[in-house]
Image (cartoon, helix red, strand yellow):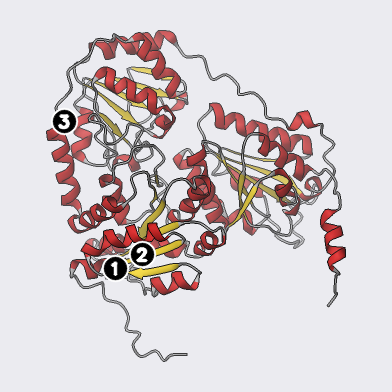
Amino acid sequence: MSIVSSEQTAAESAAPYADTAGRAVMETIRAYGVTTIFGIPGTHNLELYRPLADLGIRAVTNRHEQGSGYGADGWAQQTGLPGVVITTSGPGLQNAMSAIGTAFCESRPLLVVSPGVPRGEEFRDVGTLHETKDASAMVGAIAEWSRRVSSAAEAVDAVHDAFALFRTGRPRPVHIEIPLDVLEAPADLPAGARAARPAARGERIDRDAVARAARLIAAARNPVIVAGGGATRASREVTALAERLSAPVLTTLNGKATLDERHPLSLGANLRLAAAREVAEAADVLIVLGSKLGAAELWAPALEARGPVVRVDVSAAQLHKNLEAAVGIVGDCAAVVDELLGALPSEPRSQPDLAAARAAIAAETHEAAPETVALAERIAAALPEDAIVAGDSSQIVYLALANVVRQAQPHSLLYTPTYATLGYGLPAAIGARVARPDRPVMAVLGDGALMFSINELATAVEQGLDLTIVCVDNGGYAEIRQNEVDRGIQPIGVDLVQPDWAALAVAFGGAGRRVDALDDVGDAIRGAVAKGGVQLIHIPQAALTGHAAPARRDDSSKEDS
């Protein structure tokens, strides 16, 4: 074993190093305002990590690259900047693929940078470390684009192109693969090439389309607004439009709280409920802002419309998708709605009576899963007013909490309604907390979802975060168990052995407690938030409802080891 003196180590750490392509790429990313990256250092990506401290970029080391992608997503939703992930080649990049697929389906801005095999080594199949047949093609199959560059200049140009997409197009994930010999070679690029480029002007708004839309809307007696994920950066304008028209606002889950959900015109993120869809479908003009109205957001094949439809989207390809528009306007939602406001009459309208609609929505919410909703209401009541809540593809979220929690700001519920992945909630909460240390952050998810990313408890502790995790244990994959029963299948693979969740949190360096009574849920959450640090609250649903948990194999004969 070699021994290196402290003087030698200090000298090496202070030694100057070549201005590599890796540094040029990270300088360019930093120039656009990104201050945090997520990833895991590896043998091949070290020249991307080398300049981070010098550039003032915080590195969050997740315990799996899937968590890096979801952490970057949580960070991006709070900052308005793209999330950035550095992976190593081969398995590191492949581990991030679920997060890349999520970002594509949910229209989230994500930049993934990875090394690749050196130039000339492509497809040789000689067994080099992390060898991958065609990494760029692999990612390109699910991302907006993936580029394998051949020089530092191409790599930096790819970064600029990525930020141009994020600023003016439909935000989706992109990937830059930098061959190892390029990554580690001198960049030979002037500083000006690495500076952020001015934002390109978006597509010019069609004023004739705006005028036609305004005429339809002005003549409407019962207009309704549906806001999707593409409208969340236009909260001020959407609020002004709703108030000008006295129009009820429904949102998708990705558009949740585009209008403050405590506003008298808000009907919440409830488009998955038939009672809410009926409000939209009964409109004499339906205004759809920044949404493709996908089946996964509706829990229905399509949204119908009895009157004409006005649609606004940054992508022309979305204007007639899933619902034909009478008038479609391409452009950023904030800019287009601002134009509409200028074209609409300013006379006040009478406020609609939404009491019946609210009652029908509430009744449908409770009927679907009364016990889960009762628990979600206790959780929602205990949340700090400005809390960011990261959910997962768990019954506690999609059957209940997403409907009952009322939030004032968009991107306060982090969720993936279309890709519906498991393992998203905890790393997304970590990313959100890193970005917003001024706001309380919670992860609320099921036991199955938490086990997908339980390793990220170590990341949260290591980063010194205040983070409360509420684990609602329904005994495993409860919905899939019911799906099996409904199909006449003897339940298989769905009744899961549970760890001692509270003890597990302690083992990772956090704190944990089990809650067995519904009346204790609120105090447990408030106490965890007040104490700070990483806190896990385990809520076994069977204990709260008095129902027996699904049958599990008997482990009572196991001996202690």
The reply to whether residue 250 is in sight is: yes
Q: Return the residue nearer the eye: 356 or 58.
A: 58
- In the rendered image, the vertical position of residue 442 relative to residue 353, given as above or below: below
Disc sitting over residue 537 in the figure: 2
At x 39%, y 37%, the residue is 410
- Residue 538 location (% of width, % of height): 34, 67
Front label number (2 vs 3): 2
The reply to whether residue 399 is in sight is: no
Front label number (1 vs 3): 1
Give the secondary structure at mark 3. Answer: loop
Q: CA distance from mark 1 to mark 3?
A: 37 Å
Residue type of the residue flagged with mark 1? Val
- In the rendered image, the vertical position of residue 211 relative to residue 185, given as above or below: above
Question: Badge 3: few (under 14), some or many (20 or more) residues near its Cα, within 10 Å?
Answer: some
Asked whether the beta carbons under mark 1 and mark 2 sit within 8 Å of each other, the answer is yes
Q: Return the residue nearer the eye: 411 or 329.
A: 411
- Residue 403 location (% of width, % of height): 27, 45
Q: CA distance from mark 2 to mark 3?
A: 36 Å
Give the secondary structure at mark 2. Answer: strand
Q: Return the residue nearer the eye: 408 or 110.
A: 408
Asked whether the beta carbons under mark 1 and mark 3 sit within 8 Å of each other, the answer is no
Residue to which mark 1 is pinned: 515
Question: Badge 2: few (under 14), some or many (20 or more) residues near its Cα, within 10 Å?
Answer: many
